[in-house]
Image (cartoon, helix red, strand yellow):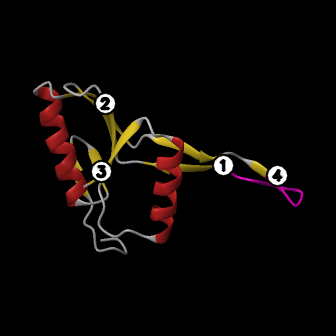
Amino acid sequence: MNKYRNIKTEIDGILFDSKKEANRYFELKMLQKAGYIIDLELQPKFDICPRIRWNGKTLCKRVYIADFKYWEVKSGMKVIEDVKGKRTAVYNLKRSLFLNQYPEYIFKEI
């Protein structure tokens, strides 16, 4: 268990941070197999703040790592999913930055 009491769960040789995330992966795999979604991707990364110079130092770029990315076949929309248990302040900030920079995605919290 981790600090949020999630139980790491393995499916298809992939270790997920929680049972909830693993179950959602299984559901999305079935949707992809049935043709409702395509191009399922795990842990896609999105730049939300570039590397910058400040006070003579270089600060690292910041990224948001979602749980899943895929295309909905019927709507033709790109979807980002984040399977949440606890919504931390850092997560809320990263979500806001993501939503501001990537409006072309439908964002779902599961």
Disc 1 is placed on an element classified as loop
Extreme-right residue of the structure: 56
Q: Residue at x 50, y 66 (%)?
A: 90
* Three-letter code, disc 4: Arg
The amino acid type of the residue labelled 1 equals Lys
Q: Amino acid at mark 2?
A: Met
Q: Earlier in the sequence, mark 2 or mark 3?
A: 3
Distance CA(mark 4)–CA(mark 2): 36 Å
Residue 86, how many percent across, how many down? Answer: 34, 70
Gap in angstroms between the C-alphas marked 2 and 1: 28 Å
Q: Is residue 97 above or below residue 39?
A: below
Tag on residue 15? 3
Q: Which residues are magenta?
A: 53-60
Residue 53's label in the rendered image is 4
Tell me the quadrant of the picture where the C terminus can be found. Answer: bottom left
At 25% from the left edge and 54% from the top edge, which residue is drawn?
21
Label for residue 77? 2
